[in-house]
């Protein structure tokens, strides 16, 4: 069975909520960017906005372009950072579920 492609989720509100976290979920540095999960899309294409992590510029750069870790290690760290970000968004009441 072929799975139908879903449109990519874009939300400026989601990205703004991620930036409200303020401290990097990896190193704790102040000042974050919403770093998209970088897998499953082509060059220059970003994944859903809901798959973003609150990362400082240094951690964001290292996970996108660094050479200290393997590609799979960088992806695994970013996956965990995305999950940590989603959990923080929920705990802080920065996202809500509509009934």
Image: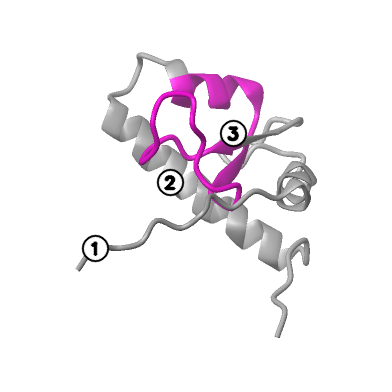
Q: Name the residue that disc number 2 marks.
A: 79
Q: Do the residues labelled 3 and 2 touch (CB within 8 Å)?
A: no
| x and y percentages locating residue 40 in the rendered image | 36, 41
Report the quarter where the N terminus lies. Answer: bottom left
Give the quarter of the image for residue 93.
Answer: bottom right
Q: Do the residues labelled 1 and 3 touch (CB within 8 Å)?
A: no
Q: Which of marks 1 and 2 is nearer the N terminus?
A: 1
| x and y percentages locating residue 2 in the rendered image | 24, 63
Nearer the observer: mark 1 or 3; the answer is 1
Residue drawn at point x = 72 percent, y = 39 percent:
23
CA distance for labels 1 and 3: 41 Å
Residue 27: assigned label: 3
| x and y percentages locating residue 72 in the rendered image | 28, 33
Nearer the observer: mark 1 or 2; the answer is 1
Please say whether residue 63 is one of the residues in the magenta stretch. Answer: yes
Nearer the observer: mark 3 or 2; the answer is 2
- Give the image's coloring scheme: one colour
Report the quarter where the C terminus lies. Answer: bottom right
Residue drawn at point x = 30 percent, y = 27 percent:
71
Q: Name the residue that disc number 1 marks.
A: 2
Badge 2, how many Cα within 10 Å: few under 14, some, many 20+? some
């Amino acid at each position: 069975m072929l799975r139908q492609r879903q449109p990519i989720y874009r939300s400026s509100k989601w990205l703004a909520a991620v930036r409200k976290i303020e401290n990097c979920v990896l190193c704790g540095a102040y000042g974050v960017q919403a770093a998209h999960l970088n897998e499953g899309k082509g060059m220059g294409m970003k994944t859903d906005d809901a798959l973003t992590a609150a990362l400082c510029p240094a951690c964001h750069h290292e996970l996108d372009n660094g050479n200290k870790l393997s590609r799979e290690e960088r992806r695994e760290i970013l996956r965990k950072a995305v999950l940590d970000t989603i959990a923080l968004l929920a705990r802080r009441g920065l996202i809500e579920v509509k009934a």
